[in-house]
């Protein structure tokens, strides 16, 4: 009896030892925290390189490079998604690899996270695409007049609403000029008002159009504003639209042509103090605006708080309404409250 119990005890002990060995082997076969999630660990630095080298993404197919640059800040949202996957996989290597895209994103956009605005400014300028389908232009005009802007640019003016804006804004602004679908209102005298050829009319038939027909569809103007601190050259522009479709991809043909022509006009400007106001239908990260960004700086980048997204008004995802300056210093930049337009207005204080 004793021998049988001893034998059974021995077999039980051997079984327990074998089970322990199997558990140890299984644990040893499992990858450690630094070996888990190799795919996630590889995706993180690739995301960082993608954002860092965005200018190298070609535009040959579907204008992909410009599309990426238009929404470049939003690629940072991939970081928390990758972090969630790394924590779920308990992958130390994937978590560590996320430092690469975080550092790249902060390098590109970290400066926008701090509030660089300061009170004051010699002149306040503002711009708004008022929207051709704006249901209440009178209220929009009153809201803009109450913003405190000394110089106000409007884009997408329609013949039907033009009189409303002129009537409502006359109470605040003594001077104004409208050419085609863009206009400029000012507390200071205006002079040398002229259209800017941004090649809206293009092709062999463009030259055959009568001058008055071209003028009625003008989308850019230039004026000299006689401020108390000296003359200021002000450009107002509404560039061609950008569209995303299956055939053409990110279609920006007209906009890019307009941007190039506008850049050339600004480059030829003799006044050292220049402000560009308008709906440029693109962000300043987009390579299509290199001709402008190489000569002017964004008021939002220099003196704003955050990204200052302006479109669409209900849920803004991109800043396509711009205030660019040269020869003057932006001291503050902000997005104004929504009106009846699908764009948000923007304003900036500048000083000499």
Image (spheres, rainbow, N blue to C red):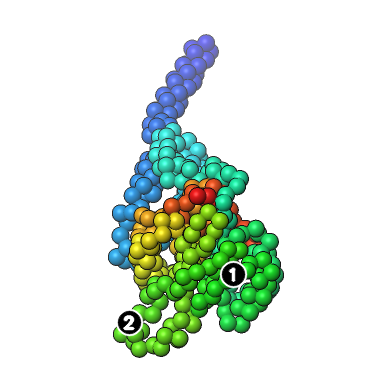
Front in this rendered view, residue 56 or 83: 56
* Residue designated by label 2: 203
User: Residue sitting at 69 percent across and 69 percent down?
Assistant: 171
Question: Height in image: 67 above or below 247?
Answer: above
* Residue designated by label 1: 175
Q: Is residue 179 visible?
A: yes
Question: Height in image: 98 above or below 145?
Answer: above
User: Residue sitting at 48 percent across and 42 percent down?
Assistant: 110
Q: Is residue 286 visible?
A: no
Query: Does the residue at mark 2 contact the one at mark 1 (Cβ under 8 Å)?
Result: no
Front in this rendered view, residue 101 or 211: 211
Secondary structure type for disc 1: strand
Question: Height in image: 45 above or below 184?
Answer: above
Q: Residue furthest top?
A: 2
Front in this rendered view, residue 5 or 101: 101
How crowded pointer 2 is (Cα within 10 Å; few <14, some 14-19, many 20+) is rated as few
Give the percent coordinates (x, y) of residue 320.
Answer: 49, 62
Measured Cα–Cα span from mark 2 to mark 1: 35 Å
Give the percent coordinates (x, y) of residue 111.
Answer: 48, 43
The mark that comes first in sequence, 2 or 1, is 1
User: Residue sitting at 46 percent across and 70 percent down?
Assistant: 192
Secondary structure type for disc 2: loop
How crowded pointer 1 is (Cα within 10 Å; few <14, some 14-19, many 20+) is rated as some
User: Residue sitting at 29 percent across and 65 percent down?
Assistant: 60
Give the percent coordinates (x, y) of residue 13.
Answer: 47, 18
Question: Height in image: 19 above or below 233?
Answer: above
Front in this rendered view, residue 213 or 54: 213
Q: How many marks?
A: 2
Give the percent coordinates (x, y) of residue 317.
Answer: 53, 58
Give the numbered dot on residue 26.
none
């Amino acid at each position: 009896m004793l021998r049988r119990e001893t034998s059974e005890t021995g077999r039980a002990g051997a079984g327990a030892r074998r089970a322990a060995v199997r558990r140890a082997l299984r644990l040893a076969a499992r990858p450690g925290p630094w070996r888990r999630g190799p795919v996630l660990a590889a995706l993180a630095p690739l995301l960082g390189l993608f954002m860092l080298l965005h200018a190298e993404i070609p535009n040959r197919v579907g204008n992909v490079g410009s599309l990426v640059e238009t929404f470049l800040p939003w690629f940072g949202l991939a970081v928390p998604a990758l972090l969630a996957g790394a924590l779920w996989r308990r992958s130390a290597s994937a978590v560590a690899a996320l430092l690469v895209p975080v550092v790249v994103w902060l390098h590109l956009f970290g400066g926008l996270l701090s509030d660089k605005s300061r009170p004051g400014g010699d002149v306040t300028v503002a711009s708004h695409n008022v929207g051709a389908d704006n249901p209440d232009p009178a209220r929009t005009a009153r809201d803009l007049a109450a913003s405190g802007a000394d110089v106000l640019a409007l884009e997408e003016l329609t013949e039907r609403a033009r009189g409303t804006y002129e009537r409502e804004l006359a109470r605040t602004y003594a001077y104004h000029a409208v050419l085609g679908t863009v206009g400029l209102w000012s507390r200071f005298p205006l002079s040398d008002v002229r259209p800017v050829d941004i090649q809206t009319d293009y092709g062999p038939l463009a030259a055959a159009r009568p001058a008055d027909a071209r003028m009625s569809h003008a989308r850019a103007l230039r004026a000299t504003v006689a401020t108390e601190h000296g003359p200021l050259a002000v450009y107002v522009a509404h560039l061609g639209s950008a569209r995303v479709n299956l055939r053409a991809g990110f279609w920006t043909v007209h906009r890019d042509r307009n941007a190039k022509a506008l850049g050339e006009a600004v480059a030829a400007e003799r006044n050292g103090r220049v402000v560009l106001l308008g709906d440029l239908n693109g962000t300043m990260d987009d390579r299509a605006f290199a001709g402008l960004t190489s000569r002017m700086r964004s008021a939002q980048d220099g003196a704003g708080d955050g990204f200052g997204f302006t479109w669409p008004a209900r849920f803004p995802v991109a800043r396509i309404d711009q205030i660019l300056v040269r020869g003057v210093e932006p001291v503050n930049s902000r997005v104004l409250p929504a009106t009846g337009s699908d764009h948000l207005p923007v304003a900036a204080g500048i000083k000499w």
